[in-house]
Image (cartoon, helix red, strand yellow):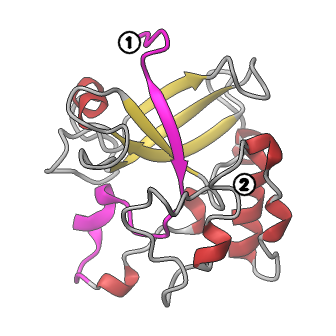
Amino acid sequence: KDWHGSLHSTHYWDCSGQGCDALNLQPWDRSRYVSPPEYAPMDPATYGGSLYGEKIWMTGATSDAVSDILGPDANNCGSDNGGGGGCGQCLMVKNHQANNKDWSIVIMRKNRCPPWSHGCGEGQFHMDFAVPGFDNLAYSTANVCGNPGTTLSKQQSSICGGVKPADCNCGQIPTHTAALRRMREGCELF
């Protein structure tokens, strides 16, 4: 579907597990229900190249209205019984107000943007992009960063939450582990 400006977006990184993955975590262990570093934005060139000319691969959360259009869960990428499906389905997005206006991204739905959160109410076309460092703690509904098993501290998860991506200093994410390096790379790519 061509959204023509009606798809609104925000960004987050709350370290919480993604809803599409919840049923796959067996046996259930709340302490292991966290977002892995592999869900940070990735450069397709590093992983064999883009399929559609996209410059970034991402994961994120959609409102129920977007999930309904995406269709059923797909690609063995989890399931969502609370938000209309769409787990594993992808959207290609281009933002004409972005720093790189000619870039497009492919974003896979891995989570539900809860209808009680900002912009995700009934009938609203909304996508939350999962980006390390870009959680806005004023709006975050599930930030567990800093808990055991998470890669970022709460402060690191929100270093860019209140600024434009071009004004973000991703260098505030340390790089002393492979997971942290992946997080910083995802932040910088975004």
For marks 1 and 2, give the CA distance.
28 Å
Figure quadrant of the N terminus: top left
Give the magenta part as a residue range: 1-28
Query: Does residue 9 belong to the magenta stretch?
Result: yes
* Disc nearer the start of the sequence (1/2): 1
Above or below, 32 relative to 82: below
Query: Does residue 156 belong to the magenta stretch?
Result: no
The quadrant in which residue 70 appears is top left
Q: Residue furthest front?
A: 138
Kindly identify the amino acid type of the residue bearing the numbered disc 1.
Lys
Which marked residue is nearer to the observer: mark 1 or mark 2? 2
Tag 1 secondary structure: loop
Q: Residue furthest left?
A: 81
Label 2 CA crowd tier, 10 Å (few <14, some 14–19, many 20+): many
Q: Which mark is residue 1?
A: 1
Above or below, 74 relative to 132: above
Residue located 24% across and 44% down the image: 115
Residue 62, percent from left and from top: 36, 39
